[in-house]
Amino acid sequence: MNIEKGKIGEDVACGYLQEKGLKLLKRNYRTPYGEIDLIMRDGNVLVFVEVKYRTSDHWGDPLESVNRRKQYKIQSVADHYLYCYGTNSLCRFDVVGILKDEINWVKGVFS
């Protein structure tokens, strides 16, 4: 996916989650280990969000692309964030899959 499509998906997901009451803390948090699309707060829970956006189902459901390897990278980036910002908040890993105009938000998809 190109960068422009990725930004569109992240914009849609961020707006959707903010409508649901989450507060954006960081966007595209990059480390030597990888990147997390969105870091948000849901009440007292720190939420690390991976966004997958597709305009067709040719390559399958976007949620299916968050495999164990991708989960490991996200967890490594989250560890880096927690180390740098010294928070001891409860944490959750969510995935937002966007296929065409349908948004599927899965909370606590992995740990």
Image: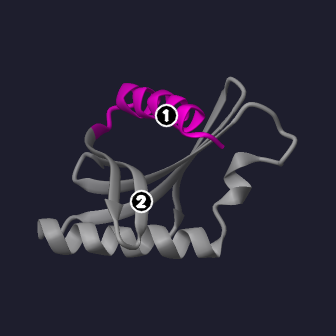
Query: How far, Cα to Cα, is label 1 from label 2?
Result: 14 Å
Residue located 54% across and 32% down the image: 4
Residue tagged 1 = 7
Residue located 73% across and 57% down the image: 64
Q: Judge by depth and name the residue closer to the eye, 1 or 106.
A: 1
Residue tagged 2 = 35
Query: Is any atom of residue 90 visible in this view?
Result: yes
Residue type for callout 2: Glu
Give the residues drawn in magenta, as a range: 1-23
Counting from the top left corner in percent of width and height, residue 59 is at 83, 48
Q: Judge by depth and name the residue closer to the eye, 6 or 26.
A: 6
Prevailing secondary structure of the magenta residues: helix
Residue located 28% across and 56% down the image: 46
State the SS at label 2: strand
Query: Is any atom of residue 111 visible in this view?
Result: no
**Above or below: residue 8 compared with residue 25:** above
State the SS at label 1: helix
Q: Residue furthest left?
A: 86
Counting from the top left corner in percent of width and height, residue 54 is at 70, 37
Q: Which mark is residue 42?
A: none
When asked about the image quadrant of residue 86, the answer is: bottom left
Residue 12 belongs to magenta span: yes
Q: Judge by depth and name the residue closer to the eye, 34 or 52.
A: 34
Q: How is the image coloured?
A: one colour
